[in-house]
Structure formats: C-alpha cells, structure tokens
Image: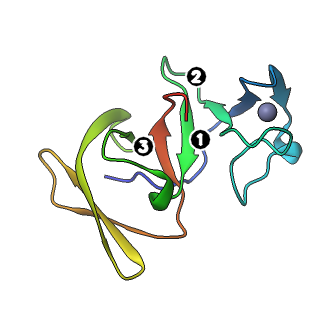
Amino acid sequence: MRVTSEYFENERYSCRSCNKILQEKQVNTETWRCDACGKKLLIDIGKRNKLVRLLPSEMTEYDTVYDQYTEKLHELKGINSKGEKYIFGVKGYRGISVSEDEFVNCMWNDQ
Ligand SMILES: [Zn+2]
C-alpha cells in the first residue's frame, strides 16, 4: 500500500470555497491548502472521488486513505503516533507507517 503523495498524472487542483481552479504553479505544496482561504485544495485525478493531501497530524480516524497501487480507498481503523512516525491501522493490512512530514492522499470530505 502506498498512501503518501507521489503525484498522479493529470492532476487538477481547485478550491471549493473560493470556487477557483488553480494552475499547478499556483499550488502551495508546503501546505496543500488554498493560500487565499486556508481550506484544503481538492485534487482531481480523474476518479469519482476527489483527494486532499493531509499531514498525519491533520487526519482523524474517520479519514479514508487512497492507495495508489490498487487505486482503492481504505477506511482507517485508528491512528497511533510514535515519535516522528504515525501508524495507520487499515483492515487487511499491517500498520502503515508514515512520517509526520509526509502528505497522505485522503478522500476529500470537506476538510
Ligand atoms: Zn480558497
């Protein structure tokens, strides 16, 4: 499973609250938030669900992560932090380890 952000082909970015489409060079990849309003940017990768990129500290156990290998969404079964690492529980997988500074591809859910 790979849930941290490598980019997908043909990503398109928008901010829903500003109702604005952003060009790639306008995207703040330090935060993956809209510079104007601070909301998370929606990332359209050509699938039904839109993604957002969240730091582990911005996530809750109700978030759903996107596995770029299988192209499937997985609900979390809990998050534990250990030093600079976060461990996500995902049904059917061993704990998934993510560094605190890695962005995780999650399903957009009005974050
Ligand atoms: Zn905005």
Image marks 1 and 2: residues in contact by CB distance under 8 Å: yes
Q: Quadrant of ligand 1?
A: top right
Image location (x, y in percent) of residue 26: 88, 44
Mark 3 C-beta to ligand 1 under 8 Å: no
> Residue farthest to the left?
92
Q: How many marks?
A: 3
Residue that numbered label 2 is attached to: 46
Image location (x, y in percent) of residue 55: 52, 58
Residue drawn at the location 48% of the way across and 70% of the way down: 100
The quarter holding residue 64 reads top left
- Identify the mark nearer the N-term, 3 or 2: 2
Residue that numbered label 3 is attached to: 68
Amino acid tagged 3: Gln
The quarter holding residue 111 reads top right
- Identify the mark nearer the N-term, 3 or 1: 1
The quarter holding residue 51 reads top right
Amino acid tagged 2: Gly
Mark 2 C-beta to ligand 1 under 8 Å: no
Instruction: Please state which of residues 97 and 36 is positioned toward the viewer in this rendering.
Output: 36
Colour scheme shown: rainbow
Image location (x, y in percent) of residue 94: 15, 59
Residue that numbered label 1 is attached to: 8
Image marks 3 and 1: residues in contact by CB distance under 8 Å: yes
Instruction: Please state which of residues 97 and 70 is positioned toward the viewer in this rendering.
Output: 97
Image marks 3 and 2: residues in contact by CB distance under 8 Å: no
Label 1: few (<14), some or many (≥20) within 10 Å? few
The span from disc 3 to disc 1 (Cα, nearest Å) is 9 Å
Above or below — where is 68 with respect to 82?
A: above
SS under mark 1: loop
SS under mark 3: loop
- Identify the mark nearer the N-term, 1 or 2: 1
The span from disc 3 to disc 2 (Cα, nearest Å) is 13 Å
